[in-house]
Image (cartoon, helix red, strand yellow):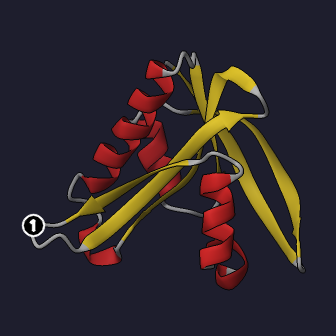
């Protein structure tokens, strides 16, 4: 799954074709410690989707995720969005992080993403 979703070709497609906007957090030595991406959701210019937000395990709980989330939200607001949505696995500890940052669960579903993978997720949103 990592190769399928995070290969150089896949990330290039997300950036160049799907127009995902990426933010990369670096430490004091300019070493990447996390990243996020967002884009317009389903051609609805009033809704942005947070596609990814990942932080290296030893850098979690230090504010990096909040900063990356704030950059994605700021980007969405600047581009006229009125809400941001995301999908997160029901068992992911990030559910609490998103709740603390103003996101609410509005739906849950199991998504077949192909190649034998499914995602058992919450759909969350935040009014901007």
Q: In this view, does 73 lie to the left or right of 87?
A: left
Residue 127 screen position, x and y as percent: 54, 19
Q: Is residue 86 left or right of residue 126?
A: right
Element on which disc 1 rests? loop
Classify 61 as above or below 10.
above
Specify the farthest residue to the front. Answer: 16
Can residue 119 be seen?
Answer: yes
Q: Which residue is drawn at 85% across and 57% down?
A: 110
Q: In this view, does 61 lie to the left or right of 69?
A: left
Is 32 in front, or is 109? 32
Classify 15 as above or below 106.
below
Residue 128 screen position, x and y as percent: 49, 18
Is 65 in front, or is 109? 65
Which image quadrant is residue 35 in? bottom left
* Figure label count: 1
Q: Which residue is drawn at 47% across and 43% down?
A: 98
Mark 1 nearby-residue class (10 Å; few <14, some 14–19, many ≥20): few
Residue 20 screen position, x and y as percent: 59, 48
Can residue 89 be seen?
Answer: no
Specify the farthest residue to the left. Answer: 28
Which image quadrant is residue 106 in? top right
Q: Which residue is drawn at 27% across and 55% down?
A: 64
Q: Which residue is drawn at 46% across and 54% down?
A: 36
Which image quadrant is residue 46 in? top right
Q: In this view, does 121 lie to the left or right of 78?
A: right
- The quarter of the rendered structure image containing the N terminus is bottom right
Residue 77 screen position, x and y as percent: 46, 20
Q: Read off the residue under disc 1.
A: 28
């Amino acid at each position: 799954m990592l190769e399928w979703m995070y290969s150089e070709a896949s990330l290039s497609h997300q950036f160049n074709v799907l127009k995902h906007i990426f933010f990369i957090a670096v430490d004091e030595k300019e070493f990447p410690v996390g990243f996020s991406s967002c884009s317009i959701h389903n051609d609805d210019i009033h809704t942005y989707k947070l596609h990814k937000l990942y932080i290296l395990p030893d850098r979690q709980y230090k504010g990096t995720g909040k900063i990356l989330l704030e950059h994605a939200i700021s980007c969405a607001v600047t581009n006229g969005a009125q809400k941001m949505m995301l999908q997160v696995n029901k068992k992911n500890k990030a559910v609490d992080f998103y709740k603390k940052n103003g996101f609410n669960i509005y739906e849950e579903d199991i998504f077949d993403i192909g190649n034998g993978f499914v995602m058992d997720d919450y759909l969350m949103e935040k009014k901007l």
